Structures are given as structure tokens and as C-alpha cells.
Image (cartoon, rainbow, N blue to C red):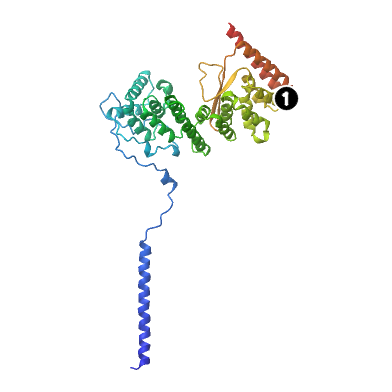
Amino acid sequence: MNQNNTEGVRKPVLYAIWAVLLVAIVAVMGVKMFNRPPPASEPSESAEAEPAKPAYSRPKPIHAVNKSEPGDPTAPATPVAGPRPKAAQAPASLMPKVEPTPETRQLVSALANLDLSAPMTPETAALWRENLARLVQNGAAALPAIQEYLALNKDVNFESIPGGAGLLGSTSLRMSLLDALGNIPGPEALAASALMLQNTVDPREIALLARNLDRQAPEQYRDAAVAAARAAMLEAGSGRLAGKDIGPLFEVLSAYGGPNAVQDFQTAASGQWKYYATIALAGLPDGAGVPALVQMLAEPASSSRGARVAAMQALAQLIPEYADARDIILEQAKQAAIPDASWINIAGALAGDQFHIGSASAENNPNLRTWHLAYGNQNYFAKSVPLTPDQVQQRLGLIDQFLGACGNNAFATAALQDAKRKMLANQAASVQ
């Protein structure tokens, strides 16, 4: 065979070999790509929301302290409160580092397994309160059992049955256990309360913990309480505390926020808590909130109509003490800038009504007036304060001033005259 024929045969063979090698390489690469694990993706919101499983063994269930058969302190008692906000779920740091004693775990179990489906009796309530007292008497030894339950992020709502909260002395089991922390002496209980304050956004819990900590260690935890209140208000403003009444947060900021509380309340007044914010501003010591309230009325463009109405009502109760409050409300009356419906509250404030955040019972106070506003879930009430004869005369003079300023406004005149009659009647009754 000549050289040309040899070359002609060799080239196709070489091409075939290269083709086989290329196919093999592609096949190997394909297998590697197929077996490669998928790239890690961002964790989903639902994955983040899933709470970590507790790193302790589930306690054996017990039903009651005075029974020998076991029950389950981790089982939700009936009825239970709604799900707690995501931000309020207890982190692993709240888990007790020490195993609870059998006695304290049994006491907490008895408290948690209270049967709220049956009518509450004084005897049942007395036994429950006795168990709570026994838990507190254990002192620092009770802390692991209390923390164990709190870390479960469950609650038992005592307000779900008539008279339940009154008989048991608390609105819920969590509030009872948090209050128990405040009644246990020693640095361990103080540290447990401080840790709970850092890890809850529930307004009632924050207010209770702040009061107890300030009672046990005056002024040491005020900054922490204010920080917790502000964080919870941000949560509420973002809609993550749906259904929660944030009134207690205003109590915390009023008590411990100092001068900076004015800015907190001004911010709240621009949102959905106008009445809470203006009532809180009016309640600040030494008239610290008066300039902010006056500003809401003096600069109409910077305030919504709702904020202006709330500010008028709050300022009216300060008229006898602060000239700035009197002058701005008188000016609003002369300009006919006060809505007719607001005159009832303004006249009532001139006669001695004081506005307070929260809910109150009219059982022992027939003159109590209460409000609930769905917007912002705001609850407040007006309560008359006792007046001395000199204060009555001062307020009668103020009412006459406003009668002269409101002109021919029949609604304002009727409200002011009615407040005047009631104040004179109360004065006569107190003399008798």
C-alpha cells in the first residue's frame, strides 16, 4: 500500500477516536452536573418563623397539686389566648439552665391546668391563689419552673370567664408568673425579670416588668424599660401586634421616658394613637407636654383633624393650671374652630374631668365616662377629681369666660351651662 492510501485510512480513524473521547468527556461532565447538590437558597419566612425545639425533656404531666396522678404542664389549658406575635416568641436564652424541682414544676402545672370551662368559684380561686403563693415562697428555687413555662410561649386567659380575672387577681397566667418574679427576692429573680423585659413585646408584660423592676431596683432598669416600650411601639406600628392594646406602653414612657417622652408621644400622635398620645402629653409632670399640644392647635397644617380634636380635649383639663392651655382653647372658641361634639368633653374637663388611658369600671363611679376607639384599639376614660371650694370658684369663672367666647354657638352654650350646674350640685352635695 502506498503512502497516500495509508494517510487516507489513518485520518478517519483519528477522527473517530477524537469523537469518542469528546462524547466521553461530555458524558462525565453531565453526570457531575446532574449529581451536584442544588445551590443554597435564602431561608423562607415560614422557616424563620418556626421556633426552635426546646432542648429539655418534656416534663411528666400532672393535673393538680393535691392529686397524685400526673398531668401535663406543657399542654395548653382551656381556653388559651390567641397566638402571640412572632417577635414575642421566647428565644432559647429564656430556657432555665437548671432543671426545675418536682415541687415547683407541679405547682406551675396546677396553675396552668386550671379548668376555665367550669364556672369559677371562690373556693377554686382561693386554691389557685394558694398554689401561686406557695410557688413564690420557694424563692429562687421557683425560677426554673417559672422560666420553663414562660419559654413555652403559652398563656391562659383569665378574662375569658365572668369574674375570673377579679377572683384570681390577674388577667392571665403569664402575667401572674411575671408578677411572681417580681415578688421573689434576690438577684436571680431580678435577672430573670430583666431577661423577660428584653424578650417580650407584649405591652402589658412590659409595663408589669418595668414597674416590678423599678420597685426592686429603683432607676436601674428604666432605660431598659423605655427601650422595650419603644421597640414594642415599632412592632405595633408595623402591624405585628394586631389586637393588642398598646396603652401600657404610654404608661411606661410617661413614667421613665423623661424629656424624650415628648418626642415619642408627638410621633404617636401623627399615627393611629392620637388620643393615647395627647392624654399622655397632658399627664406629663410640670406641664412638659403643654407646648407640644399647643403646637398641634397653633399649626393646623402640621396636624390632622383627629389630632387637633384630641389635643383640644387633653389641653382642656390643663386650663386651670396653665395659661398657655387656656389661651389657645379660648382662641379656638373665638374662631369657632371647636367641633360641636368636642364641647361636651371640653366643658367636662373645665368642671373637673381628667382623662386617663385604659379601661375602668363604672361600678363604683356612676359619673365615669368611657371610650373605645377601633382605630388604634384605644381605650380611655374620664373621671372627675374632687375640687376644693376655691377650685370650684376658679372653674366657674373659666366657664363664664368660655361662655363669652363661644358667641351664639348653642351647642357650646348648652354643654358649658350643664357642666356649671353639675359642678354646683357636686359642691352642694359635698357641703352636706
Choose between 381 and 67: the one closer to the eye: 381
Q: Which residue lies furthest to the top in this view?
A: 432
Q: In the image shown, does 230 or 362 lie closer to the viewer?
A: 230
- According to the picture, the residue beneath numbered tag 1 turns out to be 334
Residues 318 and 416: in front is: 318
Q: Residue furthest left?
A: 68
Residue 412 picture location, percent across and down: 69, 21
The single residue placed furthest to the right in the displayed view is 408
Across and down, in percent, residue 325 comes to 65, 24
The N terminus sits in image quarter: bottom left
Task: Decide if residue 279 is on the left or right side of residue 413.
Answer: left
Horizontal side of 332 relative to 89 (left or right) equals right
Task: Compare residues 189 and 270 and report the one nearer the observer.
Answer: 189
Task: State the image quarter where residue 293 is shown.
Answer: top right
Residue 95 image position (x, y, % from top left) = 35, 36
Please tell me how crowded label 1 is: few (under 14), some (14-19), or many (20+) other residues with Cα within 10 Å. Answer: some
| Residue 304 vertical position relative to residue 50 in the rendered view, above or below | above
Q: How many labels does the image show?
A: 1
Q: Residue at 66% of width from left, 14% of height from top?
A: 396
**191 left or right, relative to 231:** left
Q: Position of residue 254 (x, y in %)?
A: 53, 28
Judge whether 209 appears above or below 396 on screen.
below
**Three-letter amino acid code of the residue under disc 1:** Lys
Residue 82 seen in the current view: no
> Is residue 163 at all visible to an observer of this figure?
yes
Q: Is mark 1 on a helix, strand or loop?
A: helix
Residue 72 shown left or right of residue 370 in the figure? left
